[in-house]
């Protein structure tokens, strides 16, 4: 006898009819009380009982159905994985009577499948979002490790309605039928069915080695045949039960309360706008050294890793300047805290660059080393008392590392999962169910949230910690699948049932249950629960739609959420559904503004933010006619040079080639405006006149050269994070000053802006003089002299969002080793780093920077970075 893994949202189905030849049936279950005994459903055909604790039925007699609750029930996954020799080999049919409450991304009615990356084998009857689906892998389509064809029904299903769903494969053609009608066919697969060495068989779930997605609804029957049923037989079986199965009382079998949130179709454009504004705000908050500064002192790499991970999940490419600069900042130093290490691994996993695998392994080794020796399976900061929050970020880090192909020992996962359930879920209680009891429900259910410290010491169960505990359960279940030990697997089922029950009982999307704070962190936790357990509903609520509705209303006018960059990151991760295999909505489009003017003789185009790329798109129609004609010695418009003007000043010249006719060349040039604002661009083109000589343009006098011009084009430039960070990347290099162990003194300093902050190696801190200081200066001494060729100055306003916060330094005097001061003009843009090249490579013991001019005069000013190159 083979017990088959059964999920209480998980069952195998077959339609029980007396006219079905028993020798064609491989397995057949009917989910009524009549066939439930000794904790399992007895099959009508086959030798595979399905174990399930405390089932709930709807309806009466032989027309009953098993309720698949809208929560993860405790399932008995008994026995070993199934030997594929017991499954159909050449042809098959899977048949089911099912009513779906929700439309999951991946749904399984009958599942015997492996779909892991490119390795795809087995067969499945289930759903893809709102359509039923039938998946098959065969030898004829085998690409080396198998290929599945997911054939979806042409018509979507409606929640709460009964459907007779059948998938057939005859060795050549794959078909799906819904309610007695053909709904799709495919000819991709051919030949015998293709399986892996071992398969888990599940009913009511999509389940393979690393995935376990449960259904919500009701199930009457499932059958598996080793032949392909024909349409007349399918129609006869459909008519036999049509209209005879129990109907839900409120539209669905599980209570799905009405949501006050707008439909997702209405929300999606608003969500996309909110994401774009949030990404813009995150980019504006990045410091010029690539960091984000929240809690930078305690968690140096934490906020930066979180921001990089968020931007990648929002669709920015890994070669985006903000991503490149952020990773450079992270690479400079290994993390020293579990939070930082975990999120950094998530960022590296999301970036997906194989060249970073060795770097990621270093961080994995750190996390493994930081596991608490006193409480195995738990993590502290490191050090101190271990807690579930840190443990969660260790799990998230290991998950991120898995994206780069790095593994964590199985026993570590099992210790982590066991610790979370046994020590952080101490308060199991019975609570009243919301809504009417159905079938045999008692009206009560057992629930238990998760606590921060072991046994709930100090802090009670909270929303944030319950999502954390479910995360610690969900990740190893997802990564290890059936490799997870039996004991750990049972603990995972128990912990999931209790934890999901607690979230449902305390359901909220506008406050963190119990504590009320950390809303954005809590919502990101709910997003992970939805992703790791593949559910669109929690407690019958459409959690994503309701949470998104809250977030788009809470976003501030400047694009921020909450009080910190981390709050904004958590909100973006929720809206993008960052933990799901596929993110929600299109990637953020960061293309620059484009400008065009065709009203002049020259048609001028440009694109950019502060750095503009300009080019010639075309010339006025008819201009080239002056250069045509059979009697001419030469033909075609000949370009000598193109001149570009910004705000009336010549800023770029591009040479043409008058020896040959113009044939669409663009003559592109780039120019960076000193400051954002309203500006003008224009182009004038010197061409050989019709009477000139292209071989010697202009030598015969001015009459042989003509000048044609574009109209003056108005452009609006803005502080572009892309342009600004790209400029900062040009200045990247080792700061030799740090090797000299610098210290600093200054004429005056604002509170918490002392001179040491100008030489601490980060740009989130700064030295700033007081406004009343008439002659501000900062003096840097090196304990160990270093040789350098240049000084790099970065002013106090060290990120785009700080523009104008402190006065801009316009002119300084620089003295090296007590020598004669040299005056230097720093230019109009205080956000631009200024490199001052020395006359020769110099051994530097000390340097002094005196501020000679600032704007506005008398305002506080200073530097976030003084570096040596």
Image: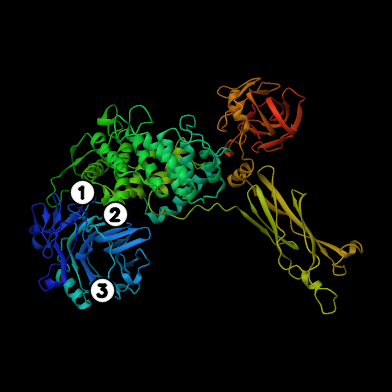
> Which numbered disc, 2 or 1, marks the residue closer to the eye?
2
The CA distance from mark 2 to mark 3 is: 33 Å
106 lies left or right of 708? left
- Front residue of 586 and 3: 3
Of circles 2 and 3, the one toward us is 2
Q: Quadrant of the C terminus?
A: top right
The residue pinned by badge 2 equals: 209
Mark 3: secondary structure = strand
- N-term mark: 2 or 1: 1
> In the picture, residue 398 is in which quadrant?
top left
In the image, residue 696 above or below residue 372: below
- Label 3 Cα neighbours within 10 Å, binned few <14 / some 14-19 / many ≥20: some
Quarter of the image where one finds residue 465? top left
Nearer-N-terminus badge (1/3): 1
Residue designated by label 3: 181
- Characterize the local packing of mark 1: few (<14), some (14-19) or many (20 or more) Cα atoms within 10 angstroms: many
Residue identifier under label 1 = 73
Is mark 2 in CB contact (under 8 Å) with mark 3? Answer: no
The quarter of the rendered structure image containing the N terminus is bottom left
Circles 1 and 3: CB atoms closer than 8 Å? no
Q: Is residue 136 above or below residue 827?
A: below
Vertical order, 47 against 323 (above or below): below
């Amino acid at each position: 006898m083979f017990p088959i893994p059964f999920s209480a949202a998980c069952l195998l189905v077959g339609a029980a009819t007396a006219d079905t030849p028993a020798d064609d049936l491989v397995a057949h279950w009917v989910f009524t009380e009549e066939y439930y005994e000794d904790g399992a459903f007895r099959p009508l055909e086959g030798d595979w009982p399905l174990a399930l604790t405390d089932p709930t039925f709807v309806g009466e007699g032989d027309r009953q159905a098993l309720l698949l609750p809208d929560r993860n029930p405790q399932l008995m996954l008994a026995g070993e994985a199934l030997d594929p020799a017991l499954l159909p080999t050449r042809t098959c049919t899977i048949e089911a009577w099912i009513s779906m409450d929700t439309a999951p991304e991946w749904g399984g009615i009958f599942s015997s499948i492996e779909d892991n990356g490119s390795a795809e084998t087995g067969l499945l009857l289930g759903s893809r979002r709102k359509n039923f689906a039938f998946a098959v892998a065969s030898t004829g389509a085998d690409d080396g490790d198998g290929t599945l064809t997911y054939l979806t029904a042409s018509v979507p299903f409606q929640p709460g309605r009964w459907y007779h769903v059948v998938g057939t494969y005859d060795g050549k053609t794959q078909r799906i039928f819904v309610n007695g009608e053909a709904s799709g066919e495919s000819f991709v697969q051919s030949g015998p069915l293709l399986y892996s060495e071992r398969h888990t068989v599940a009913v009511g779930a999509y389940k393979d080695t690393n995935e376990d997605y449960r259904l919500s609804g009701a199930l009457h029957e499932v059958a598996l045949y080793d032949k392909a049923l024909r349409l007349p037989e399918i129609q006869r079986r459909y008519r036999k039960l049509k209209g005879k199965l129990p109907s839900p009382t409120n539209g669905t079998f599980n209570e799905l309360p009405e949501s006050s949130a707008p439909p997702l179709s209405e929300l999606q454009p608003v969500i996309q706008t909110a994401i774009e504004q949030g990404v813009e705000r995150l980019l504006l908050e990045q410091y010029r050294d690539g960091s984000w500064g929240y809690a930078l002192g305690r968690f140096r790499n934490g906020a930066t890793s979180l921001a990089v991970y968020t931007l990648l999940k929002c669709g920015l490419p890994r070669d985006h300047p903000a991503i490149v600069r952020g990773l450079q900042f992270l690479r400079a130093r290994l993390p020293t805290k579990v939070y930082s290490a975990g999120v950094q691994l998530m960022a590296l996993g999301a970036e997906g660059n194989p060249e970073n695998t060795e770097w990621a392994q270093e961080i994995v080794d750190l996390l493994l080393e930081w596991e608490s020796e006193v409480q195995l399976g738990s993590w502290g900061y490191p050090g101190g008392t271990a807690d579930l929050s840190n443990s969660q970020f260790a799990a998230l880090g290991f998950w991120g590392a898995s994206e780069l192909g790095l593994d964590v020992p199985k026993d570590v996962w099992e210790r982590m999962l066991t610790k979370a359930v046994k020590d952080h879920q101490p308060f199991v209680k019975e609570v009243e169910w919301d809504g009417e009891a159905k079938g045999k429900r008692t009206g009560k259910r057992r629930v238990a949230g998760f606590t921060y410290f072991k046994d709930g010491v100090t802090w009670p169960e909270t929303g944030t910690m319950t999502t954390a505990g479910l995360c610690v359960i969900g990740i190893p279940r997802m990564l290890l699948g059936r490799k997870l030990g039996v004991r750990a697997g049972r603990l995972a089922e128990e912990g999931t049932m209790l934890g999901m029950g607690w979230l449902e009982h305390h359901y909220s999307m506008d406050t963190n249950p119990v504590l009320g704070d950390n809303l954005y962190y809590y919502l990101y936790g709910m997003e992970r629960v939805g992703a790791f357990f593949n559910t669109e509903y929690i407690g019958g609520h459409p959690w994503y739609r309701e949470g998104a509705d809250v977030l788009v209303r809470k976003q501030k006018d400047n694009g921020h959420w909450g009080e910190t960059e981390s709050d904004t990151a958590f909100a973006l991760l929720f809206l993008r559904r960052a933990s799901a295999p596929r993110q929600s909505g299109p990637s953020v489009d960061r293309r620059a503004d484009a400008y065009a003017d065709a009203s002049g003789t020259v048609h001028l185009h440009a694109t950019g933010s502060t750095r503009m790329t300009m080019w010639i798109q075309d010339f006025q129609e008819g201009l080239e006619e002056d250069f045509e004609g059979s009697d001419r010695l030469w033909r075609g418009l000949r370009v000598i040079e193109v001149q570009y003007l910004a705000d009336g000043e010549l800023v770029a010249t591009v040479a043409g080639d008058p020896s040959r006719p113009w044939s669409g060349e663009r003559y592109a040039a780039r120019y960076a405006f000193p400051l954002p604002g309203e500006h003008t661009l224009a182009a004038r083109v010197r061409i050989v006149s019709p009477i000139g000589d292209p071989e010697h343009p202009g030598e015969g006098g001015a009459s042989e050269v003509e000048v044609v011009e574009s109209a003056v084009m108005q452009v609006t430039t803005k502080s572009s994070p892309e342009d600004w960070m790209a400029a900062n990347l040009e200045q990247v290099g080792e700061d030799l000053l740090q090797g000299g162990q610098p210290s600093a003194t200054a004429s005056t300093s604002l509170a918490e802006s002392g001179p040491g902050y100008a030489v601490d190696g980060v740009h989130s801190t700064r030295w700033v003089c007081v406004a009343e200081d008439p002659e501000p200066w900062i003096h840097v001494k090196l304990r160990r002299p270093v040789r350098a060729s240049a000084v790099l100055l970065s002013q106090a306003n060290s990120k785009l969002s700080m523009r104008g916060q402190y006065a801009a330094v316009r002119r300084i005097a620089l003295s090296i080793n007590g020598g004669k001061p040299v005056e230097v003009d720093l230019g109009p843009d205080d956000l631009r780093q200024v490199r001052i090249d020395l006359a020769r490579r110099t051994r530097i013991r000390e340097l002094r920077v005196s501020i000679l001019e600032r704007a506005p005069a008398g305002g506080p000013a200073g530097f976030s970075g003084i570096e040596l190159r």
